[in-house]
Each structure stands twice: as structure tokens, then as C-alpha cells.
Image (cartoon, rainbow, N blue to C red):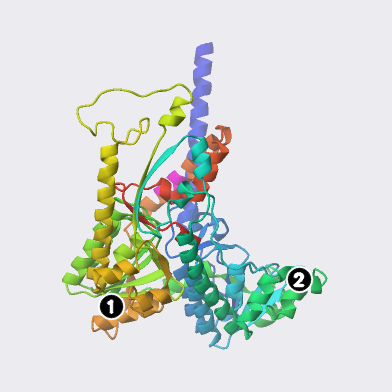
Amino acid sequence: MLAFGWKLIGFCRRVVGNIAFIAVIAFLVTLVLMDRRDRLPESAVLVLSPAGALVEQGSEGILANDLLGEDVTAETILRDVIDALNLSREDARIKAVLLDLSKLKHAGLTKLQDVGGAIKQFRKSGKPVIASADFFTQKAYFLAAHSDRIYLNPMGGVLLTGFGIYQNYFRTALDRLLVQLHVFRVGTYKSALEPLMRNSMSEFDREASSALLDVLWASFKADIAKARGIDPETIDDYTNHFSDRLADHSGDSAQLALAFKLVDELKTADEVRQELIELAGEDPSRRTFHQIGFHDYLKAVRSDRKSSEPSPKVGVIVAQGVILDGIQPAGKIGGHSLASLIRQTRKDETIRAVVLRIDSPGGSAFASDTIRREIELVKSAGKPLVVSMGSVAASGGYWIASAAEEIWAAPATVTGSIGIFSAFPTFERSLETVGVFNDGVGTTRLADAFNPSRPMNSAMADALNQIMDRGYRTFLSRVAEGRKMNPSAVERVAEGRVWAGQTARDLGLVDKLGSLDDAIASAAQKAGMEKYTVDYIQQPLSRRERILKQLNELFTGFIRSIIATVAPSPPAILRLLSESLGDDIMQFNDPQGIYAYCMNCQAF
């Protein structure tokens, strides 16, 4: 009887648990599937609130906007921001745009400039763009500077710090841990592994980085100065003498920003809200101004504008993230997955021209060449393929780009970094300190190659040096062939050095300076198209697959968070090393271990 009772309790527990689980699944699926579109008011303020990182392509994450809303997102897609501004420009229902930049965390300079350009175009409609914040970070202020009016909380401030490249160096730490790092690289300025080889920045890296930062900072200052009607030197004065200027205003950072004409007025949130109510009317249910978030606005407007798209088309493929071998999800570039998308445009008769938008610091040399081959096949098929560079298209990113018929970049794009490297750590000295020794026999001289418990095999080290040299020569020849340059001319601008877009154009690495839209127009012109539609090519994923994937990642993330809570944390030095090198390097999977990657480029 007791046994039966326990079985009954166990049965009931399982039934209740399953019902609860099904209820949760049903609730989450309903959230994903239901139409959350807000009814667009006849009069509203468009709230432009980019959150997290501003990216070319959204990466796969645990939570999606459709699931829990934009506030939890870690990324905002650049095209969504620009489309919202462009579509609302002629929309009579949108009376103004409010820039809420409080959640913006990271954005490359070229992406900020693209959004700034869209803001300027919106202002031509005569409708105001208002930026309001309690505090403006440097990236947020760049966008705010392009608005009609900038309001700052009287208790706030504007922080401009300039650009810099600072990183941790681990040579002494690795020596103390007795880790032997065997580095193989080609390119005097190829500094990707310097943090592991040195205790300070090399003079070559310092020279190249300083030249690059000067160009980017000059571009940043010039854009703000033009937008605000002040001199670029004012920005330098504000930044370099911030403490002194702050003392002149009794430590009041808001008054300092006002005095330097960085903002127009000091206003509290309720004062800004009242102004917006006067522009778009008051929503009684919310006791604030009529408004719509840009995500909801896009859903409403895009669904209304959906129709059968006429031929011909310009196919646009976004290639964002580190370049890895094989098939990779959105937010990373897979050698096979990106090659497959490019091949799709070649075989699609409705696509007459292709634009590849690259935003990548590089990665696997093997994967880069796999992608490059598909670009060559598109050109052989008679379809023009134009590359548009985002914030970064360096190393492996440039390896891919060099095959294009034409390359467009922004003046502040970080590109070049023509060089390669490989590295292999061995721990024989570390093991010896705890009394562990490795010995044995093999049938060949290479039997112990890549055994981390033994010293680096000298024969394999010599072979890797030869492979590195050959890989670098291949990189140079690919660039020379694609850019129709003399190999010696390519070598002079290579050596792993990074360049700003406007300098790269002068050196012949880039053809023209402009935006993604400029590149699309150029590709269409090359294909002889006057009228065309733009089709963004993405890996197909059914709704069912998206839902299952989101739910799977949601619960996987929950389990991982529990494990992370109870598991011991790694040593501080390893955490610091991982943070300094970034997640990208930890995912490297080139079959030959050869990488064309620019580490400093990640700062942009």
C-alpha cells in the first residue's frame, strides 16, 4: 500500500510537472507568434533607442526581441535604425524623432556616421530630431550632435575621451607560469600576438596605431564640429583640458557642456516630455506624449509595404564577425556558409548584381580563401560583385574583399592588415615544476608534433615557418591579382599594417569612399539596371526552427547560468587573458592553424 502511494505521488508529480512545462512552452510560443504590433497613432514621436552594440547583422542569442522586447537585446541592427529614419521621413504620422541613447554601448565610427547621415536626411523633412539624456557618452554624443536640439539634464554631463588602444601584455605572466609560446607570423606590423610575446606595445605597432587613431579622431571631431557649428579645436580643448575647464565652472559638468556649445539647453525629463506632448499630443493612458518605438514602427510599416518584389535585384549579403571554417551562425562568418550564400546569388537569375557588406577583423585564412573563390565565380558568371566595408574589413576581411570588382569603404573604415600568424603553446616546463615528465617513442620525426606536454618539435617548427611564408606570399598574390597591383607595391603597404579607409584609397587598397547605399547603386549601374530592388540574402530558417532554437537556447542559457553559479571560477590570470584576447581567438578553427586576423581592429 505504501509503495502504491509513493507511485501515485510520483505519477501526480510528473503529470503536474509536464502540464506546467507545456504551459510555459505554450506561453513562450504565444509570445513569439502573436502579433505585437502597436497600432500606429495618427500623431506620434518616433523613439529611436538603439541598445547594446550597433551591428551589421544580429548574432544568435539566448533571448530575441520578439520574445521579451527590445530592452533585453544586446544588439541593434544598423539597417533597422536607418530604415526607421528613412521610412518615417515622409510619414505624416511621425511628427518628430526622439533620440534615446542611454542603452547604446558599442558602435564603430563608420556605423555612427551612417546613422548620423540618416538623421541629417530626416531633418530635411522639416520635422525635428531631439536628443535628450541625463548623461552623454562619447558614442551617444556623436549621434546626438546630428540632431536639431540637444537637451541635457542639469545634473548630467558630456564625456568625450578620444580614441585609444590599450591592452594587457602577458609575457612575464606566461614566463612565470613556464608556458612556452611558439609563434609563427609574417608581417612587421602584424601585432595580433604581441600581448603574449611582450610586456609593452612594440614601436611598429605604436607607429601604425597612432597613425590610424589620428585619422579616426580627426574624422570624429570634424563630423561633430560641422554638425554643431563649432571648431574641431574646441573638441580637443574640451577633452584635453577637461579637469581645468570643469574647475572654471565650479565642477558643474552640465554648465561646462553648455558653455562649449555641446548642448543647446539644460532640461529635466518632465520639461522634455512636455515639449514632445506639444509636438505629438498627449496619450492619456500613458500620461506622456504619443510615441512608438522604432522596432514596432518598422514592424507596422514594413508589413504594410510588403508586396511581390519585381525583378531585377541587387543581392546584398552581410558578412559580419570573425571568419571561421565550416558553417557558422549569424554574427560569425563561416567559410562554407558564406560561400553558400554567395553561390546562391550566382545561381539566382533575378539577382543581377551582388554587394558583399564586410564587417570583420578576419580569422581563418583557409575559410577566407574558400569565400574568395566563390566571389571569383560570381564575377566569372558575368555578375558584378562590389564590396562595401563597414567599420572593419581587415586581414581575412581584406583577403575576401580583394577579389571584388570594386571596393567601397568609409573614410574611417579600418582595413588592410595584410599578414598572417599561427601559434602553439607547450607546457613541458610548467609540468616539470609539479613533477610531471613526458617521454616515449615514435615512428617518425613528427610523431610528437603538437603534443603540448613536450617541447616544440624542431622539424615541425621549421615546416610551420615555411608554411607561414607561403601563406603570406599567397595573401600578397591574391591582393595583387584582385587589385591589379604589382606584388612589390602590395608588399609595401602590407606587413600586417592597418590603414584608415581614406588612406587605403590613396594606397590603392580601396576604390571609392562611400556608404552601403553608394555601393549598391554602383553595383546596379555596373549591371546596367536603372530600376531594381534590394534583396538581403540570409540563410533560410523556418518559423518552427526559429521558435525551437530560441526555446532551446533559452533553457540552455538557464542551465548554464546555474552551472556558472556553483562551479569554481577560473584563475584570475586566465580570466584576464581570455578577456584581453577576446572570444574570437578562442573559437579559431582553421584546419592548418593559419590566421589572417587583426586584434587591434576590434577596438573599432
**Which of the pair 147/401 is nearer the observer?**
401
Q: Nearer the viewer, mark 2 or mark 1?
A: 2
Write down the residue under mark 1.
Answer: 310
Q: CA distance from mark 2 to mark 1?
A: 61 Å
Is residue 356 inside the magenta stretch? no
What secondary structure is marked by label 2? helix
Other residues around mark 2 within 10 Å, as few (<14) / some (14–19) / many (≥20): few
The quadrant holding residue 330 is: bottom left
The quadrant holding residue 222 is: bottom right
- Is residue 407 shown to the viewer in this render? yes
- Amino acid on which disc 1 is placed: Pro
Q: Is residue 480 left or right of residue 292?
A: left
- Vertical order, 428 against 403 (above or below): above
Label ID, residue 244: 2
Is tag 2's residue or tag 1's residue first in the polypeptide sequence?
A: 2
Which region shows up in magenta?
Answer: 548-553
Q: Is residue 446 left or right of residue 260?
A: left
What secondary structure is marked by label 1? loop
In the rendered image, residue 501, in percent from the top left (x then y), is placed at: 41, 73
Magenta span: predominant SS is helix
Q: Is residue 329 left or right of residue 290?
A: left
- Amino acid on which disc 2 is placed: Asp
Question: Who's the residue at 27% across and 64% down the image?
Answer: 476
- Is residue 347 shown to the viewer in this render? no
**Which of the pair 550/207 is nearer the observer?**
207
Question: Who's the residue at 37% across and 78% down the image?
Answer: 506
Question: Who's the residue at 24% across and 72% down the image?
Answer: 486
In the rendered image, residue 44, in percent from the top left (x then y), is placed at: 60, 77
